[in-house]
Amino acid sequence: AEIAIVDLKTMKVVHSVKSGHETEGVEFSPDGKLLLVTNEGDDTVSVYRVGSGTPVRTVKMPKGSRPRGIRASPDGRQYVVTLENTNKFVVLDSGSMKIVKTVDTKLGPYGVGFDPAGKHLLVAAARDKTLQVFDAKTYEHISDAPVGQRCWHFSFTPDGSKLLLACGRSNAVYVLDASNYQTVKQIGDLPLAWGIVTYPASSGSIESH
């Protein structure tokens, strides 16, 4: 797989990065110097320099785990990577890029992100119709919220009051109250809804500040 890096002023490709097999999640380091990519097909996380596209290192995940989502912690000291096939997420130290913690989840963890306040880590357990809530510092499990089928990615609204969750096999976006993560509305007729971004940008599993 290849990732194109585009200059937003000229909208031209500056260079492309050859990544691993079946590239899935993408995240930048807090200082903007590194690009991290999850490769579900070969169970790795690739790290590159943004300016040049030069490979920095390849981090191996457990065999057969299929890493999907990746998100930097609010303090920039760690990265969280969801492992779809082993029903876990791992926490990587941002300096050493070594796994420092492994946490069990429900089935098929996919999208992952932190709330705007940096207090909660959210994981979309896509095969279990569940949004899971964890403490953002200790990674202890706090609660689960029932949602639709195969919910992959999510985003908070810019004001932080709602969470929008794309549930592909339900062909809908679930709207959750961000204070208690309970569903308040469903927006239907959205075939295979996969991801959500907002403008202005907000915290979520794809887009963040």
Image (cartoon, grey):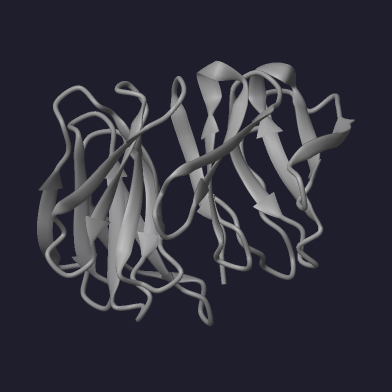
Quadrant (top left/top right/bottom left/bottom right) for the C terminus: bottom right
Tell me which corner region of the image, top left, top right, bottom left or bottom right, holds residue 31.
bottom left
Vertical comparison of 4 with 7: above or below? above
Q: Measuring from the top left, give residue 78's x and y in whole percent.
A: 30, 63
Left-right relation of 29 to 196: left
Tell me which corner region of the image, top left, top right, bottom left or bottom right, holds residue 187.
top right
Q: Is residue 37 visible?
A: yes
Q: Is residue 206 visible?
A: no
Vertical comparison of 25 with 124: above or below? below
Q: Residue at x 73, y 23 (%)?
A: 191
Vertical comparison of 116 with 130: above or below? below
Q: Residue at x 67, y 47 (%)?
A: 196
Q: Measuring from the top left, give residue 138's x and y in whole percent.
A: 39, 54
Q: How many marks?
A: 0
Front-most of residues 141 and 146: 141
Left-right relation of 189 to 120: right
Q: Residue at x 77, y 52 (%)?
A: 179
Q: Measuring from the top left, give residue 91's x and y in whole percent.
A: 28, 50
Left-right relation of 44 to 33: left
Tell me which corner region of the image, top left, top right, bottom left or bottom right, holds residue 192.
top right
Quadrant (top left/top right/bottom left/bottom right) for the N terminus: top left
